[in-house]
Every structure is written in C-alpha cells, then in structure tokens.
Image (cartoon, rainbow, N blue to C red):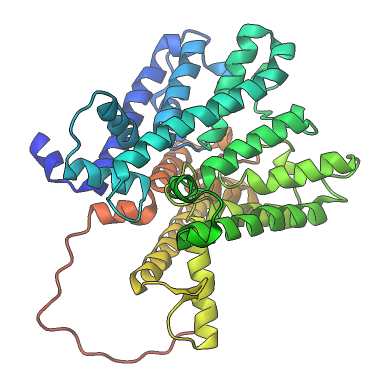
Amino acid sequence: MKKRLGNLNATGKLAVGFGLIILAGTFVLMLPFSSRSGSWTSFLNALFTATSATCVTGLVVVDTYQYWSLFGQLVILVLIQVGGLGFITLGAYLSVILKKKIGLKERTAIHESISTIEIAGVVRMVKRIVQGTFLFELTGAVLLSIRFIPEFGWGRGIYFGIFHSVSAFCNAGFDLMGIREAYSSLTAYEGDVLVNLTIMGLILVSGIGFLVWDDFYRNGFHYKKYLLHTKIMLAASFVLVFGGAILFYLFENNGLFAGMTLKEKALGALFCSVSPRTAGFNTTDLAGLGNASKLLTMLLMFVGGGSGSTAGGIKVTTAVVMVFTAVATIGKTQGVNIFKRRLEEDVVRRASAIVTYNGILILIVSMIILAIQPFSFTDVFMETFSAMGTVGLSTGITRQLLPVSKALLILLMYFGRLGSLTFALVFAQRRVVPPVQQPVEKIVVG
C-alpha cells in the first residue's frame, strides 16, 4: 500500500489525501458526542457533512447548530480550515516552522496544491498564504464579533465570529444561525452593513487566489508589473461582481426585493452576486428567486473564483479563456490574445476540457436525480451546480434527497474541490508521442 502511494504523482497524492481526511472526519462525526442528542449519526449523513466541510461547499443534510454538538461543530470547523487551505499547504507550513528540509517532490506537491505558475518560490508563498489567512480570518472574526457579542453574549459571540469568519474566508458557507431558525443562514442580517460587507470582503479576498496575493505582495499597486493571470482575475472579478449585482437588482427589484429599502436592495443584490462565487451564504430566501435570477446564480456558481484559491467552479480564468477563444475564432485571429499577450495552446485545450468535464458531470447527476425524485428542474440544477462548484447554495431540497442522490452529490463535491480535470489526470498515463500518427481528415463542426 505504501509503495503504491509512493508511486502516485502529486495530483494523485492530493486526491488520496483529501479522501483520507474526509473519511477521518466522517468517522469522528458519526460518534455520539458529535451530535447534540448523543446518538450515533448515520454513515451517509456524516460522510455528506464531512465531504461538504472538507470540500468547503456548505450543503447540509442537517442544521449545523441544531444537530451537531460543540465538539461536532469544531470538527466541522477544522475540516473547513484544512480543506480551504489544503493539507499540503498546512503540512509545508509546519515543516517551515520546524525548520525541516523541503525537497523537490514536496515543492512539486505544493505547486500542484496552490496552483502556482512555477515551482520556484512556493515555500515563501506558503508562509505568506498561511499567515495572511489567519490575519484575514482574525480581522473578520473581530468585526463579526462586534455584531454577535451584543446578541449572543461574550463567549458565544466570539465563537460565532470565529466560526463564520473561517467559514466565509474558506468559502464554505456553513453557519450557526440555526440558533434562530434552522437552515436560515444569514437572512436575519439582510440589511446589516457590517455583517454583509465583512462576509463579502472575506469571500472576495480569498476567492481571487493565492497567486494574486503574491503578486500584490511583490508589486504593490503597480498594475503594469502584474502577471497576466492577476490582470485577468481583477478585471473579470470586477465585471462578475458588479455586473451580477446590477442584473440581480433588475431581476428582483419587483420580486424578492420588493418592499425593501434602497440600502437593503443594494446589499441584497451585491450579496447575491458575491456569494455564488463560491461561499454558500445567503441573506435572502433563494427559493423565492425568479427563474432569471436562479439561472444567473447557476452561471456564477459554474464560474466560481480564482485558481489556487479556496473557491470552486471552473475558475474565472478558465471562463475568460473560453470567451476570448470564441472571440478569436469569430474574428479569425491568430491565437488567443488577452491584454496584449498570447496564450499557450495547452491553456486553451485545458480550459475546454475543464468546461466539458464539469458540464457533463452536472448534466449526468442532474438527470439521475430528476429521474428518481420529483423535484423541479431548476431546484435540481441549483443543487448540482452548487455541489460541483463547491458553493453550498440550495433552494432547500438537500435534506429531502434519497441516499443515491446524496452519494452523487458527495462525488460532485469531491470532484469540484479537486477539479474534474485534476481528478481525471490521476488516472492518466504519461503522454507518449507515437512514432506513427493517424492520418488527418476534416469534419464539419458548428
């Protein structure tokens, strides 16, 4: 067994590592002292919760506050933190603290885990990632505690501040607002500026990706010195966040937002735009969204956040590459050019593969669930897009799913956290160029 694991590449070890963490979390959550009632939790419900936490999704089959004991909640919080940062990143940081030597194999694994462009400098980046993460989470916890302490008291208020800050930064979407009402998320803070801006800020900061962090650290506000990746992330994120908010405002102004003040509408629209990428919190009732808004939510969940971040989805840069590939094809230009730079052909092929794999997996699982359970088309697709994008938003059907449907969503969450293409590469053999290639023949597409 040890020899087989040793033969795995960095991608394979990443897949196996996440699987082992999920299983460990499952068995701990099954124990009687993990639940408030003191009873054993079924394997499937514990596995679903552990997968959702480790894959920083946020879909739940039981209310986190009302079902799990304090111990169970802390287990979930640890799984969120490990899943958000990545066990390889945390392990590397521990090695740095203990002043252990980090070899080429370990550096390659770190490179795969945090999605850097090159291996050089990954150890320094790990230190910045972990230290930056705890700094942002601490800041978020302090700001949220300002609101929660007057409501819940000092002890619980501070604990709630820490839990929701970590959950937001890791884009997990788990909440403890079952203390008010089960599965209510942050709906009680619909018009609260402090809570809304803090949660959105944590989501956006972590969602842009660690590579962008590193670029900021090295180059400050000198935009011209930024990597192409950073420029794409900043420009596309601006369009997605504010473009999405404007659309949500227009779609729901006379719908879900009717009767709200202008401030509440603005906060609601902005939160609806930020949260699907890919945090899973909601300040409004998602079941009340119109069909246009639900479709927009699905698209945002499909895109997700930045590469090498705590967010899921196909990633912003992948979506941008696909759009510019289409533009280049229509314009019949040579190669795909963005910000006066031409992209490698391999990047375009990889982006196409990611979109195709994710789309196929979502369609297959959605069709199976629709075939065996009497849910509406939009509710099922909201659920599957949410699982694949590791978002956690739901119209409320998660707890009504049959065991088969739960198992399928568990797989989607796992694939979504690793990346569908990454998972496929685990089983791929090293590419060998054949001595004789097959003859070329044209076909018609489009």
- Compared with 410, 25 (above or below) is above
Question: Is residue 291 shown to the viewer in this render?
Answer: no
- Compared with 280, 419 (above or below) is below
For image coordinates 17% across by 60% down, the residue present is: 429
Q: Position of residue 178 (x, y in %)?
A: 65, 21
Q: Is residue 362 left or right of residue 143?
A: left
- Image quadrant where residue 59 sits: top right
Q: Position of residue 103 (x, y in %)?
A: 17, 40
For image coordinates 54% across by 85% down, the residue present is: 330
Question: Is residue 220 shown to the viewer in this render?
Answer: yes
Q: Is residue 237 left or right of residue 32?
A: right
Q: Is residue 276 left or right of residue 22?
A: right
- Compared with 340, 54 (above or below) is above
For image coordinates 39% across by 47% down, the residue present is: 415
For image coordinates 27% across by 56% down, the residue present is: 425
The total of numbered circles placed on residues is: 0
Given residues 209 and 281, the one toward you in this image is 209
Given residues 183 and 110, the one toward you in this image is 110
Q: Position of residue 249 (x, y in %)?
A: 80, 52
Position of the N terminus, as image quadrant, is: top left
